[in-house]
Image (cartoon, grey):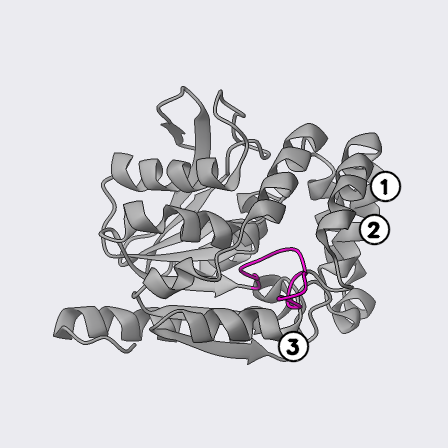
Amino acid sequence: MPTCVLRDGAKLTYADQGVGPTFLLVHGWAVHGGFFSDLSTRLSANHRVLTLNLRGHDGADRGKAPLTIDTLGADVAQFLEKLDLKNVTALGWSMGAMALWSAWPKIAGRVDALVVEEMSPRLVNASDWDCGLAGGYSEADIPGTLNEIQADWQTYVSRFAPRMFAPSVRAQRPELIEWSAREMSRADPAAMASFWASMARQDFRTSLGAISAPMLVIHGADSLVYPDGATEFVARAAPNAQRIVIDGAGHVPHLEAPDAFFNHITTFARNARRSVLTGGVKP
């Protein structure tokens, strides 16, 4: 795989497939770019598809910079700059969406459209916010999560990985859940704890209003990770956003409902490109 060397010396590997309008795929917490393999192969028939392995995750160095959302955002911006990418449709799944939101002030001139897959602008619930992680996850729960991650990562993954998928998918495709848990188990628990702590500190509710690019917000109808209101809020807060809900999907719609997901994002990207070419706003 090709490598991108960042300013602090960290090396990120990435996949580069196909030719045509560019898609950038940014994965979520504790996984890696391989979770997009089927999607990237399919997209590459008519697009150039770049799939990152984020810092601190499998396939990339930790580097010297803090393992935070801000650092991931800066990494994405450097990657786009180093490859001189323009007119990009950037897709962020879960934590990947936070990385793109963080990067936005630096990448707005290179990214024409955003796809947000299953992410809340704020991870923790509070008196003024009930659309964080399901189950009422609050600031008081963070220390316990960090202890679990670092004390026994394998056990934590065995509980977390199945919850990413809709109950129907778990019943019908147990091999997908087993593969996901196996791949996640390879992550570095210390790095994952650092990223989790950073995610839990983020609040993008206000800053979403500054992202004027066309944005497609995707929610899994059967998500056990974020409630419906999380993606509803994102679609309302961003000035040029639209939301779609994919039936039968949980937190990983691109794997759980691949046909519907592919059709939605390619139609959106095509309409967004047409809007940019004609000087319009709405995709």
Q: Amino acid at mark 3?
A: Ala
Q: Main secondary structure of the magenta part?
A: loop
Residue corresponding to mark 3: 221
Q: Amino acid at mark 1?
A: Thr
Q: Secondary structure at mark 1?
A: helix
Residue 276, given in percent of the width and then of the height, sits at 19, 69
Q: Residues within 10 Å of mark 2 (few under 14, many from 20)?
A: few
Could you tell me which quadrant the C terminus lies in?
Answer: bottom left
Mark 2 and mark 1 residues within 8 Å of each other at the beta carbon: yes
Q: Reply above or below: 42 against 181.
A: below
Residue corresponding to mark 1: 155
How many marks are shown on the rendered structure?
A: 3
Task: Give me the C-alpha separation between circle 2 and circle 1.
Answer: 7 Å
Q: Amino acid at mark 2?
A: Arg
Query: At x 46% / y 47%, what residue is drawn?
Result: 99
Q: Reply above or below: 182 against 42.
A: above
Which labelled disc corresponds to residue 68? none
Q: Residues within 10 Å of mark 1 (few under 14, many from 20)?
A: few
Residue 38, given in percent of the width and then of the height, sits at 54, 57
In screen coordinates, is 22 left or right of 138? Answer: left
Residue corresponding to mark 2: 159
Task: Give me the C-alpha separation between circle 2 and circle 3.
Answer: 21 Å
Query: At x 33% / y 58%, what residue is drawn?
Result: 47
The answer, for residue 132, to whether it is visible in the render is yes
Q: Which residues are magenta?
A: 118-132
